[in-house]
Structures are given as C-alpha cells and as structure tokens.
Amino acid sequence: MATIAQVKALLKAHFEGDHEKFKVISLQIAAHEAKVGHTTSAKEIKSIVEDSPAKKANILKFNRNDETLELRYANISINQLVVSLELKNRIKRVLEEYRKRDILLKNGLINRSKLLLEGDPGTGKTMTASVIAYELNLPLYTIQIEHLISKYMGETSAKLRRVFEQIKKYRGVYLFDEFDAIGSDRTYDNDVGEMRRILNSFLQYIEQDDSASIIIAATNNPKMLDKALFRRFDDVLEYRLPDKEQISNLLKLNLNEFATKDVLSGRVLEEAHGLNHADIVTACDESLKEALLKDTVVNESILITFLKDRKRLIQYKEVN
C-alpha cells in the first residue's frame, strides 16, 4: 500500500504535469509492493506504468536526442545476492546509513552514498546496484556510457554535468557501469587531453555532490582507474569469483526444489569452481529448461553438462 507521502507526491506530480516524476513514484510503490510479498499488485502497477500512453519510453531524456539515463525496475532483494559475508555486511551498512541519514545529519555526519564496485565480470556488481535500489525503494538509473561519450570536444563534459543535475533533482540510485571508460588513469590518455577533461569534470562533480541520491561506479578493471578517484568514493567494494560455499548457495537459490540432492555433490562444486556467479546461474537456468523438456528434475549429470558448457564457452572467448 502506498504511503501518504507517496500519494501526495503522486498528486503533486500529476497536477504539475511531471510525467517522469509520476512514473518514478509509481515504480517506487510497485517495488514496495513486491518487497512485502504483493507480487501480483507490483506487476500490475509496473504494467500500467509501462503501457501508459503518457510514458516517454523507459528513458529519462534531457532532450529528444539524448538517451544518457535509463530507468530500470529493480526487484532483487539482498537475500538473492550471493557474495561473501563481509561484502554483504558492508552493503547492509550502506542501507542502514541511508535509512538513518537524518539522524546522521543531525549529528554532523553523512551517510555513505558514493560507492566504487570493482572486480571480475559477472560477480554481482550490477546486481548490487539493483539490490540497493530495491531495498531502499528507490528508482535505479543506469548511465548509458555509449550515449555519454561523444566524439565532439566538450560535449561529454556537458552531458556529464546534466547527469549530475539529474542526480540532484531526482533521488535515486545512479549506476555508472563500465566506469573505466571515463575513469581511466590520466597518464593513459592519448586523446589530446579530452578524456583528462572528462575525468576532471567527474572528479569535480562527485566531490561537490550533496544530493540525496546514491552514486555507484562499477568496473572490471580497477588498475586502469585514476588514483585520484578512489578518495572521492565513500567505500570501495571488491567482488571476486564465488568460493565453494557461495557456489552451493547459488545452486540452492536457483534450483531449489527442482533438483535432486546430488546437485550439491563434490563433483558439481568442483566443476563449478572458476566460474563466475552469472555463469553458474546460467548453467542452472539451462539445467532447469532441460529438466522441464524431459519431464524430470535437475540431477548431478544434467547440471555438470551445462557447467562444462559454460567453461567451454569461456575458453572459446579467450582463444578468439
């Protein structure tokens, strides 16, 4: 059920003709409904928003030709995030500080709101942004790097400025994925100083940011990042390939009652070793489809087959 504050905000957005704000609040209500177990209501609200004639695609546009920000619907709880206990506790700390940010502010303190996520691909960085948005009942905006970077001198910095204006205007979780595209060490720059100017702009904007939003930057290549970036973030979270315990938790979470007990065998855990979280989840999904097609349940043999398929695909990509 929507809170009275959300109802007021909906009415205000409606009468002011602010369709984007109306949409954001509606999705916040949908996320809350999903969080308390009202999945049908959440899906109905989301469907109404997405099918609305007044919708402006699923993009926050600064102008008709700008698609720098994409609004996404987050529906992943922290219980679905399989990472180390230390990392999960640090994420929970971010959530707790945000929820109690008013108490912190009254005592001259500021909640963690600028996070750098670094580590191997497919290990949960993007998923973490969705979890934080869902748990805090905030919209998730992803900065589309391919639309942000421009070949025209000065245009990228101008777009970046508008992104930070949006961050201040609309409270939410803002994800800069593949962040090394704009945060690379300035000594690597061979582009007549343009990328240096972009990075300097980002450093300036993030340092001056005092919004109620959460800014997340994610990278697979932390060694490429400029050293000046690290002190601009409140926390740096490191993501690694899953260990045996995390692999076991991933299998339980994604197969549940649709598998025999032997899917947690030593052979399966050994075969899954070296794969990232996303590959293991994909192997689970493929195993479930195979079991459904054959009218059976996932067993050790089926799962190992698809885990090996993921490893073969990785090896093929590495060779090519």
Image (cartoon, rainbow, N blue to C red):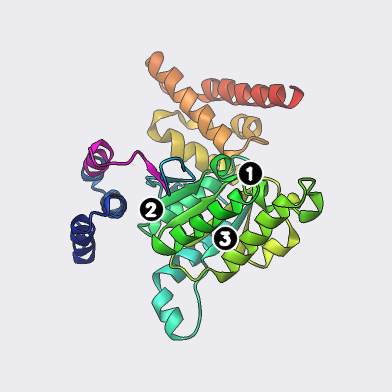
Identify the residue position indicated by label 3 in the image: 115
| Dots 3, 1 in contact, CB < 8 A | no
Q: In the image as oriented, which residue stretches furthest toward the top? A: 294
Q: Position of residue 54 (x, y in %)?
A: 24, 42
User: What type is the residue that disc 3 sits on?
Assistant: Leu
Please state if 25 lies on the left or on the right of 162 as rendered.
Answer: left
Which quarter shows the N terminus?
bottom left
- The CA distance from mark 3 to mark 2 is 17 Å
Q: Residue at x 44, y 50 (%)?
A: 141
Whether residue 45 is in magenta: the answer is yes
- Residue numbers of the magenta segment: 44-61
Q: Is residue 293 left or right of residue 235?
A: left
Q: Residue at x 47, y 32 (%)?
A: 261
Q: Which residue is mark 1?
A: 152
Residue 81, visible in the rendered structure = no
Residue nearest the observer in this picture, 270 or 67: 67
Type of residue at label 1? Tyr
Residue at 81 percent of width and 54 percent of height:
187
Secondary element at image label 2: loop
Question: Is residue 241 part of the magenta span, yes or no?
Answer: no
Q: Quadrant of the C terminus?
A: top right
Marks counted in the figure total 3
Q: Residues within 10 Å of mark 3 (few under 14, many from 20)?
A: many
> Label 2 belongs to which residue?
139
